[in-house]
Image: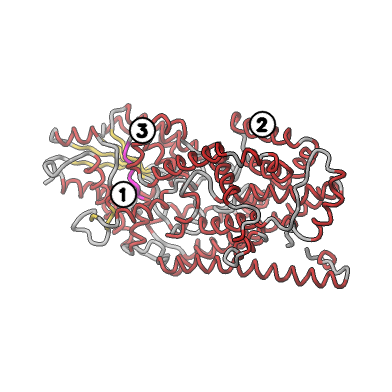
Amino acid sequence: MRRSSFLALALIAAISAAAPVRADEAAPGCDVPAALLETGSALPKVEAAVKAGGPLSILVVGSRSSTIGADDSSAYPARLQVALRDKLSQVGVNVSVEIQATKTAEEVAGGLVKLLEGKKPTLVIWQTGTVDAMRAIDPDDFRSAVDGGVGALQNAGADVVLMNPQYSPRTETMISVPPYLDNLRAVAQQRDIPLFDRFAIMHQWNDQGDFDLFSAHHGLELARRVHDCLGRALSAFVIAAAHLGPTQQN
Amino acid sequence: MTSIADQVAGSIVAAATETAPARTGAISLPAVGGRELRLDLFRGLALWLIYIDHLPPSLLTWFTIRNYGFSDATEIFIFISGYTAAFVYGRAMLEQGFLVAAARILRRAWQIYVAHVFLFTIFLAEISYVATSFENPLYTEEMGIMDFLKQPDVTIVQALLLRFRPVNMDVLPLYIVLMLALPLILALMRWKPDVTLALSALLYAVTWEFDLYFSSYPNGQWAFNPLAWQLLFVFGAWCALGGAKRMSHILSSRVTLWICVVYLVAAFYVTLTWYVPQMSHWLPRRVEQWMYPIDKTDLDVLRFAHFLALAAITVRLVPRDWPALKSPWLKPLILCGSHSLEIFCLGVFLAFAGHFILAEGGGGAALHALVTLCGILIMWGVAWLISWYKRVADKSAAKKGAGNADLAGGG
């Protein structure tokens, strides 16, 4: 279980405890340590699109953890759109979603380019790993599938952000997520693209007591709040990675 | 379950040395001077670390070695298991012949198998409970993992075949396969230890070259590929049967020491880049591409080398007669290490239980620390109890002359 990012948390938290930033001032109770919203990699196409005045078209490709049942408007992609439109009001921001439920990274990767054809997004946010972890796909195969998929997206002219699985404490004894976290991190490092560390961020929220993710019984309300916070954190992450200073924001 | 591999010390061994040298043939048996406490110490340490690593991460997780380099407690555990197994059964093979030794080894493998199935039962009980009591729209997708409960017939049979293994239950199946291979390994070692080690390395290389693996259910492969991990086990056996002695001049050389130190520091730096991504910019891309992925399933060479470096430095820093080995502070570790199978199983169980308590209790940091601490205390307590029982049982057996636990169907 090397490189498991949730171990990383303690260190990252310790380093950055001094300077926690809010994902958004308006959303109380979901601080994200600055280190988790920083990335060494850039999003040049997003930056160019925004600086040229838009429009900014984003495609989220994900599995069922990118949704909350049928409630599209409160899942994180919709919340991302709200947050980005709020921050980049001069630019037309449009977020669309392609849910590939129960498909492994390999199955999704094969169809990625086709997904792009109609939409020509500037940025693709690819959330993956959960299905592979549940089916215990060989981590090496997973890694090469993700790598291939990212390559195809880049060739098609899009910036790419990878997003890893959720932090799900209740299923930790059943699903071994760490190898997939590690491999996503490795692909992101090698391809020099940003990785949105959803796992570490949710873990952080759980540790801080913002959300009790351990709890067995929760209605839709918790899921909505978590997704809202994820959407905000993701918007802050994209803006930081695209080097959009206050001049582009309002 | 008496752990045969743990009875390294004591009268059996001491008596055996006197008769052994005449028949050693190719293998030279290690000098016996009481129990090798260092083995127990580090195996005990490995057991504690494995337990901590199996719990959800907390501050304590930062004390486990996998955060400071490539290898982790599993390497220590498998190496020492190979070492002690060869030590005990190698001797048995010399004294009692191949058949008897093989039978004893198979009995040991059977015990491990039973332990594994027992743990699986506990696991099944736990997740069945979780599955029926868990409703959270946030995790609809993750709960799909419970689908295997819908076909218990297939799942349970696959588990008995060691093909279906829940998370954290990968080490015992590996251990079982290695024990099954041990008679062959020892027989070869008796003939030519170096050739055996070379064959083992060859199998390791072939495994990497042709991507051989043990398949698992419903898909994928064993998390620890026995065809690769056997190298560590056989290397342990080789060291026990005289290899360590022959390597002693290499181990004591300054050059070795420096190579090891440099490698460990480099590995530490690389691990840091996993946790502080900003640092990865100082890691040359070419090195990165050559190095990743560092494969745990197939015991990556980098991991193996890391373990070797750690071991070389440890052997240097901790001599056989290190006074601290007698200190009461290390006693709990040594006790746990000397009953490894029992304590290992207990650790897996405690990790399940710990997850469960954290899930039910809300999982705060304080509760987390308490669970970890209690787990370790329980491991210590049980190890102490086993030792006590063994001492008492041995004493009364000696008094009565016979009174073997095996007669009563125990053992």
Q: Looking at the picture, how far across and down is residue A22, in whole percent?
A: 23, 56
Q: In this view, does A79 lie to the left or right of A197?
A: left
The residue at which mark 3 appears reads as A191
Q: Which region is colored magenta?
A: A193-198
Vertical placement of residue A113 versus B164, above or below: above
Instruction: Name the residue type under label 3.
Output: Arg
Colour scheme of the rendered structure: secondary structure
Q: Do the residues at discs 2 and 1 belong to one chain?
A: no
Q: Which of marks 1 and 3 is nearer the N terminus?
A: 1
Number of the front mark, 3 or 2 = 2
The answer to whether one can see residue A163 in this image is yes
Q: Looking at the picture, how far across and down is residue A67, in whole percent?
A: 34, 50
Q: For the C terminus of chain B, give its image quadrant.
A: bottom right
Is A197 one of the magenta-colored residues? yes
Is A176 one of the magenta-colored residues? no
Mark 3–mark 2 contact, CB under 8 Å?
no
Q: Looking at the picture, how far across and down is residue B32, in whole percent?
A: 76, 53
Count residues near mark 1 (Cα–Cα under 10 Å), then give few for <14, some for 14-19, many for 20+. many
Q: Which residue is drawn at 40% across and 54% down?
A: A167
Vertical placement of residue B391 versus A179, above or below: below
Q: Which sits in the foreground, B35 or B72? A: B35
Element at badge 2? helix
Using the rendered view, name the quadrant where residue A151 is placed.
top left
Q: Looking at the picture, how far across and down is residue B138, in whole percent?
A: 37, 57
The answer to whether one can see residue B215 in this image is no
